[in-house]
Amino acid sequence: MLNYYSRQSNSGNFTKVDTPPRGGNVWIHVDEANKADADKLIKAYNLDADIIKDVFDPNELPHIEYSEDGKTLYVFLRKAWRSKTDQIKTLPLLVVVGDKDFITISQAHSNLPLNNIDIKTYSLQQSQYFLLLSLIYTIVSEYGGLVNHTSEVVHTMKYRLRSHEITNKDFYRFITIEDNIAIYKYNLRAIISLIERLRDNQDIASNHDMIEAIDDILLYVRQLLASVESSEHSVASLYNVYSTVANNTLNLRMKTLTIVMLVVTVPNIFYGMYGMNVALPFANEPWAYWFVLGITVVIMLLIVILVRRSKLL
């Protein structure tokens, strides 16, 4: 779906309009884009069809491309969100910076920052690059929220280990966290490469404020990567602890089961002997039953005492 946002001047805010005004100065956002929307943009704004259609590739990495004349900048990002199963999902978000227009295309539903940047003192072309940097910062901030959530989950699992028995669900959760961490590292590193390439753009390199904004974004991304790596180490340590605790729990249960089987087996030996159709000592005595029962109880108690002294229980 195509949405048009226009402003009357560099100092104005974007407002939604039904049709794009002539002369540019418009932000076009395609939300939940389809190929028909892409074809419409390609024809209306003379965009590179091959580059535009890459936004429909679910595996497209963050990177930068330029048009053949060098006037149009294409920036691929990946928008991330958390699914109901706590898995991190990402889809490409394409940003097109032209002479006068600013275009964003996403297959997913996107809430973009239309008016959260001060652009009053910059020309239209400069303000578009500030919008680009603001959008990149917003995408990185979304990753920041997801990374913080993952860190909290890891922290919670540390305390859960102390008070709850380990279940298969805990190990499935480890798999999800490890997959999420891999996605964070994969995309954040790609964003670092993308931002460093933006430094080479002449319109950005000549503006001190934009270089400072890039440095701030780079610092933020690197801090997120450090947090992700810290969570990765914590998950690896926790996984080892969980595995050790699970093995110890299994060993204790097997040991307990073995001792119970040993204690229960001894009476069956005597009961089996006196169940045979042969002559046995005391078989005809009236107190034979109580004698056999007493012997088995004594032997069972001796086994329990020996087990306790050997610290098997």
Image (cartoon, rainbow, N blue to C red):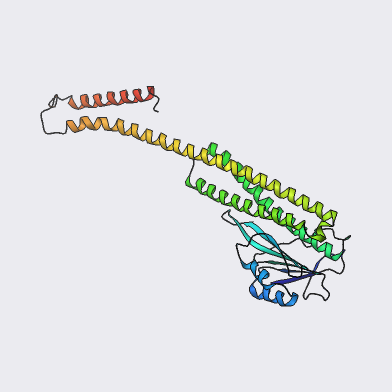
The quadrant of the image that shows the N terminus is: bottom right
Q: Nearer the viewer, residue 62 or 10?
A: 62
Please, is residue 130 above or below residue 290 in the view? Answer: below
Q: Nearer the viewer, residue 302 or 282?
A: 302
* Residue 24 appears in the picture as rendered: yes
Q: Quadrant of residue 61?
A: bottom right
Q: Nearer the viewer, residue 120 or 130?
A: 130
Q: Residue at x 65, y 70 (%)?
A: 53
* Residue 115 appears in the picture as rendered: no
Q: Residue lying furthest front in this view?
A: 68
Where residue 296 appears, x then y in whole percent? 25, 26
Where residue 281 appears, x then y in whole percent? 13, 24
Q: Residue at x 56, y 51 (%)?
A: 179
Q: How many marks?
A: 0
Q: Quadrant of residue 265?
A: top left
Please, is residue 191 above or below residue 21 in the view? Answer: above
Please, is residue 88 above or below residue 151 in the view? Answer: below
- Could you tell whether 111 is left or right of 157 in the image? right
Q: Residue lying furthest right in this view?
A: 121
Q: Residue at x 85, y 56 (%)?
A: 207
The quadrant of the image that shows the C terminus is: top left
Where residue 291 appears, x then y in whole percent? 21, 24
Where residue 109 appears, x then y in whole percent? 66, 64
Please, is residue 266 above or below residue 103 in the view? Answer: above
- Could you tell whether 154 is left or right of 30 in the image? left
